[in-house]
């Protein structure tokens, strides 16, 4: 490696992308192309960066396997930044194996963190936790240690465990300070601020208040039956009933919780569950069937009793019913939460993250665009969607997760 390449590499490691680019901007050899691509990515020109990295990888060929693997890792990170969540993962896995076998443990760890961040975006939290655990005890450079700490903190936040999240963020802050990269320190500070921002609204016997994440954690640990409108489940302490895939049953649970300790009228339940203002005998028959299903599922914690005008929740061991709502209203809160990260998302990537069809996502995006909550840039396959940051609260409880247990 010549002196100019070494100097550019040191500049990149210190976070000076412009300084690195100045040293190699006129060179076309594979090492210079790889450094130019990495510098361009740091400066935000991701399409050009990917093109340069692909050229570098072709130039290295099979004779320089480690250098080629590093280019593949950098390209995977660019795909992540572009929110191309369907980017093939087999090349990244092979690159990790190559880097590990050749003793380049730092870049192998970097590649693993790219994979972890992708899993977090997809809501595959159990897989992300398992992948991150493989880095436990590894001697990481400060910048990678900070990224690993941020990933660990996000996993803890998504699991509503604020103590471990604070510990992970403290480690990330110390590592970012050692790395001396301002952008990384700003990312850690932004993550720490999430702990103090409202993440939901609690409706409790006629009162409403906003909750930060530590307060949500305390609510979940309390002896209350919580109808969670953020993650669409019913929870009592460590036991929960997922209802995200059963919208009618969740709508009934939500209406019953909103009316507790009184009863919810049959007309209100029909309107909530079946989205109609004019009920008839068929709706009332369907209501009896769905109430029977919900009664069976809630049996460990509560009864659903029929009254003169409707139905009411009657608790067994829980002391009260609490209704937790998202900090924003609307049927597309999870979609808005994903868009709130400030990145440009494709329809396909949003559908993959939300585990739904691209057509459903497109309809939702059209609705959000009409309301001024999202906007499209580009056209055709290059179309991407953006939304302004949702200032004033955190979207932790709204982000998708493959399983409530994750």
Image: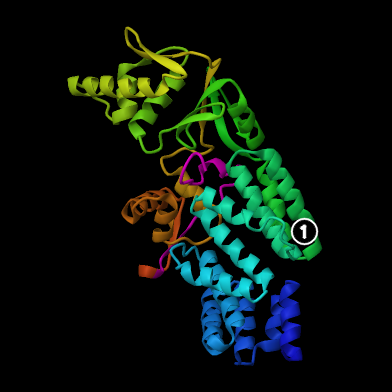
| Residue with the mark numbered 1 | 175
Front-lying residue, 287 or 30: 30
Magenta stretch, overall SS: loop
Question: What residue is at 58 percent from the left and 50 percent from the top?
Answer: 129
Residue 235 relative to residue 189: left or right? left
Q: Is residue 388 visible?
A: no
Magenta region includes residue 389: yes
For label 1, the crowd category at 10 Å Cα-Cα, with few meaning under 14, some 14 to 19 and many 20 or more, is many
- The answer to which image quadrant residue 302 occupies is top left
Q: Is residue 125 above or below residue 163?
A: below
269 or 370: nearer the eye? 269
Looking at the rendering, the stretch of residues picked out in magenta corresponds to 382-406
Q: Is residue 251 magenta?
A: no
Judging from the image, the colouring scheme is rainbow
- Pinpoint residue 378: horizontal percent, then vertical percent: 42, 68
The image quadrant that residue 66 belongs to is bottom right
Helix, strand or loop under label 1: helix
């Amino acid at each position: 490696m010549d002196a100019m390449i070494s100097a550019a590499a040191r500049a990149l490691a210190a976070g000076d992308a412009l300084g690195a680019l100045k040293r190699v901007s006129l060179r076309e050899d594979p090492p210079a192309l790889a450094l130019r691509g990495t510098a361009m990515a740091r400066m935000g020109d991701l399409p050009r960066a990917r093109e340069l990295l692909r050229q570098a990888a072709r130039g290295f060929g099979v004779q320089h396997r480690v250098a080629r693997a590093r280019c593949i890792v950098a390209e995977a990170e660019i795909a992540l930044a572009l929110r191309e969540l369907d980017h093939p993962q087999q090349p990244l896995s092979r690159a990790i194996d190559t880097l590990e076998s050749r003793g380049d443990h730092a870049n192998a760890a970097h590649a693993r963190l790219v994979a972890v961040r992708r899993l977090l975006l997809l809501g595959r939290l159990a897989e992300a936790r398992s992948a991150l655990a493989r880095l436990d005890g590894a001697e990481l450079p400060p910048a990678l240690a900070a990224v690993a700490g941020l990933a660990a903190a996000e996993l803890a936040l998504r699991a509503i465990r604020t103590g471990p999240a604070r510990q992970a963020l403290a480690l990330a802050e110390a590592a970012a300070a050692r790395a001396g990269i301002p952008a990384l320190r700003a990312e850690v500070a932004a993550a720490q601020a999430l702990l103090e921002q409202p993440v939901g609204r609690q409706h409790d016997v006629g009162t409403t208040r906003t909750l930060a994440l530590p307060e949500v954690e305390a609510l979940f640990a309390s002896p209350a039956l919580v109808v969670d409108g953020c993650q669409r489940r019913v929870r009592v302490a460590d036991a929960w009933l997922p209802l995200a895939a059963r919208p009618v049953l969740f709508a009934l649970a939500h209406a019953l919780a909103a009316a507790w300790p009184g009863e919810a009228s049959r007309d209100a339940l029909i309107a909530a569950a079946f989205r109609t203002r004019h009920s008839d005998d068929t709706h009332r028959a369907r209501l009896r069937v769905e109430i029977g299903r919900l009664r069976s599922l809630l049996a460990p914690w509560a009864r659903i009793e029929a009254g003169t005008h409707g139905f009411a929740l009657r608790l067994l061991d829980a002391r009260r019913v609490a209704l937790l709502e998202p900090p924003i209203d609307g049927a597309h809160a999870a979609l808005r939460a994903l868009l709130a990260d400030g990145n440009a998302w494709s329809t396909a990537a949003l559908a993959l993250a939300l585990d739904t069809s691209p057509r459903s996502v497109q309809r939702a995006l059209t609705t959000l665009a009409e309301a001024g909550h999202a906007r499209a840039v580009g056209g055709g396959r290059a179309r991407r969607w953006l939304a302004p940051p949702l200032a004033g609260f955190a979207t932790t409880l709204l982000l998708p997760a493959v399983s409530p247990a994750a």
